[in-house]
Image (tube, coloured by chain):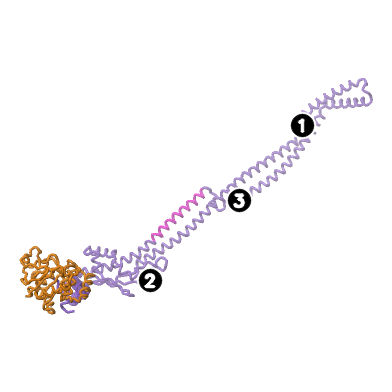
């Protein structure tokens, strides 16, 4: 492997060498270009990843941005688009990303942000813009997560408020439908009244039964007095008395005749006929006497008056009992209605208590979330501790040496690759195979 | 330098290397495939011998005896194209006699194989030659035909002087070669001086 071999390899594998030379030139140009550029550095301090703005692990444990994610966050399009806006569109997001260098060491708490540009002012502005926007964005991430929680809690509190209002309306409507429902003693008063009415009704029933017994006795007395009054009327009628006396005499004579004499006794038929006639007369007189009002009798009138008084008492007792029963029925219905209404009302009140408890808990969580958000916004996970003020230019002489070294290295790399490829090609070439096969040299190609 | 000149220079190098071992050589030119260019290389080698002062015989078994010489503007007088007699393929002793006569009459003999793969007459010529030149068309990969040819040449104990890659298409068309038409006639069956 001599110089001619390398010449042959370079001429035959010239695309490889050319590409290597271009790469070397680009690398050298890039390095020297960077040496011409200015770099500005801003620093942000990183909060302890384990510290959170809230003591509640359920709400805030996940809210802080991990430190290892900050470089990626700093180079994200979301942050860099804001940086581009801050820089008034002098650079695109991709250009800013190329000019930006953000790295954080393991366990370090300070993260440098380096921005390179040909203009020193732009480099300073870029580094500061990235630091500011990164801090702002990080704070937004923390607070936005609280905002989401707060928004959700507010929504739930609103729902609970509507539920409480609905329950209050339902309770009020239930109270309006039955005025006694709202009074806690309503049921007790009704129950007491029912008991009282029942007692009075029972007393009245007992009194009525006594009055009924008295009325019955008086009725019997009236019956008895009426017979006596009729007898008195007959006794006091002289015609009737005469007829009865005469009839009695004639009847006694007829009986005596019938007993003493046979049927052939003269005058018997006449006696019988007379007796019948007298009996008829007596019956007529009896009928007439019977038609005389017993009220003419004072005792009958007195007993009859007493009986009427007793009947009136019984009627009064019955009416009073009916009144008691009516009132009892009404009160019993009211009690039943109140029981049903009280049942639904109790259910409504229980629901309201539950809703009130939930509302209270949500309100407490909302208050806590608001406090946490305020705390997180005030603390944040990162903060700018050192803004870039000046930009430094890279060392051109060193860059030139490095650039030339890169060029030479690329050239050697290209030649090396070309030599390897040439070796491989020769090893597998037709000439080599033909030489081995025929055991003879392969001459130069004859064209013709 | 024209392509023709380059080709001649390459063939001259080949001729010199052959003559280093065999001052009056009988060279058998063979190839694996028909289009490898053995006629062109054989003719060019014969021209090279002739231009080097050799009385040269070009034994061409193909139908167009002078096809390999097409494109050469100037063909030396010392070059003769000879068509081999038909009985050569059947009689080895006659073939030997034929070659012996050629050795007596010419300083260098270039025998171009008539077929690819080799015919029976070609094998006899290869056996009687001092060595062989294998022609390969440039770009063609070494294949099974090459292996067969190398085995055959080893079998008849014919030394291979060298392998010549050939790239066709740079020389003038064959029809323009008028020089050969004025050459002495080829004697069939026997060899006579031109």
| Prevalent SS, magenta region | helix
The chain letter of the purple chain reads A
Camera-side residue of A80 and A193: A80
**Side of A192 where A416 appears, left or right:** left
Residues under labels 1 and 3: Cα distance?
53 Å
Query: To which residue does mark 1 refer?
Result: A294
Query: To which residue does mark 2 refer?
Result: A51
- Give the label on residue B90, or none: none
Marks 1 and 3, the one that precedes in the sequence: 3
Q: Position of residue A246 (x, y in %)?
A: 87, 25
**Side of B194 where A86 appears, left or right:** right
Q: Using the rendered image of the protein, determine whether residue A191 is visible from the camera's viewpoint.
A: yes
**Side of B70 where A98 appears, left or right:** right
Which chain hosts label 1? A
Which chain hosts label 3? A
The magenta segment: A150-176
Marks 3 and 2, the one that precedes in the sequence: 2
Query: To which residue does mark 3 refer?
Result: A191
Say if the magenta span includes residue A167.
Answer: yes
């Amino acid at each position: 492997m001599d110089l001619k071999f390398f010449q042959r390899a370079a001429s035959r594998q010239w695309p490889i060498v050319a590409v290597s030379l271009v790469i070397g030139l680009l690398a050298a140009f890039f390095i020297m270009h960077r040496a011409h550029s200015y770099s500005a550095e801003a620093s942000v301090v990183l909060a302890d990843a384990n510290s959170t703005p809230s003591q509640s692990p359920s709400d805030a444990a996940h809210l802080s941005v991990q430190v290892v994610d900050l470089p990626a966050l700093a180079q994200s399009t979301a942050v860099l688009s804001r940086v581009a806006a801050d820089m008034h569109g002098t650079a695109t997001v991709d250009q800013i990303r190329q000019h930006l260098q953000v790295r954080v060491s393991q366990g370090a708490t300070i993260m440098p942000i380096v921005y390179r540009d040909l203009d020193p002012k732009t480099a300073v502005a870029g580094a500061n813009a990235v630091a500011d926007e990164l801090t702002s964005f990080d704070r937004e991430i923390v607070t936005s997560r609280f905002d989401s929680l707060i928004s959700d809690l507010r929504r739930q509190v609103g729902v609970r408020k509507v539920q409480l209002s609905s329950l209050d309306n339902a309770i009020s409507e239930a109270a309006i439908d039955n005025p006694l429902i709202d009074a806690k003693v309503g049921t007790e008063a009704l129950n007491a009244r029912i008991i009282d009415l029942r007692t009075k009704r029972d007393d009245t029933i007992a009194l009525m039964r006594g009055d009924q017994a008295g009325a019955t006795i008086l009725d019997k007395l009236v019956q008895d007095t009426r017979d006596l009054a009729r007898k008195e009327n007959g006794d006091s009628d002289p015609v009737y008395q005469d007829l009865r006396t005469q009839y009695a005499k004639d009847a006694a004579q007829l009986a005596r005749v019938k007993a003493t004499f046979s049927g052939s006794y003269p005058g018997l038929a006449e006696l019988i006929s007379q007796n019948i006639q007298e009996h008829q007369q007596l019956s007529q007189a009896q009928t007439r006497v019977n038609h005389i009002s017993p009220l003419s009798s004072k005792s009958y009138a007195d007993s009859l008056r007493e009986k009427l008084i007793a009947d009136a008492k019984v009627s009064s007792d019955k009416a009073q009992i009916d009144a008691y029963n009516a009132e009892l029925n009404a009160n019993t219905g009211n009690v039943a209605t109140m029981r049903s209404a009280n049942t639904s009302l109790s259910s409504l009140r229980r629901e309201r208590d539950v809703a009130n408890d939930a509302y209270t808990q949500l309100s407490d969580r909302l208050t806590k979330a608001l406090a946490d958000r305020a705390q997180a916004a005030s603390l944040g996970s990162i903060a700018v501790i050192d803004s870039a003020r000046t930009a430094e230019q890279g060392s051109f002489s060193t860059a030139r040496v490095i650039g030339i070294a890169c060029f030479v290295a690329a050239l050697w790399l290209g030649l090396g690759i070309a030599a390897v490829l040439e070796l491989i090609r020769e090893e597998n070439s037709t000439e080599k195979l033909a030489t081995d096969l025929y055991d003879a040299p392969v001459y130069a190609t004859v064209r013709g | 330098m024209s392509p023709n000149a380059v080709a001649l220079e390459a063939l001259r190098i080949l001729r010199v290397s052959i003559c280093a071992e065999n001052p009056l050589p009988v060279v058998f030119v063979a190839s694996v495939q028909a289009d490898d260019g053995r006629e062109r290389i054989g003719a060019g080698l014969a021209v090279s011998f002739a231009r080097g002062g050799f009385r040269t015989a070009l034994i061409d078994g193909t139908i167009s005896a002078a096809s390999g010489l097409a494109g050469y503007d100037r063909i030396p007088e010392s070059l003769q194209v000879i068509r081999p007699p038909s009985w050569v393929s059947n009689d080895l002793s006659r073939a030997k006699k034929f070659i012996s006569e050629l050795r007596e009459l010419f300083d260098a003999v270039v025998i171009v194989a008539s077929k690819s793969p080799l015919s029976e007459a070609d094998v006899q010529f290869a056996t009687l030659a001092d060595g062989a030149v294998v022609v390969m068309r440039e770009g063609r990969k070494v294949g099974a035909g090459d292996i067969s040819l190398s085995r055959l040449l080893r079998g008849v104990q014919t030394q291979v002087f060298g392998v010549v890659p050939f790239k066709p298409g740079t020389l003038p068309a064959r029809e323009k070669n008028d020089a050969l038409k004025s050459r002495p006639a080829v004697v069939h069956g026997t060899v006579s001086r031109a």
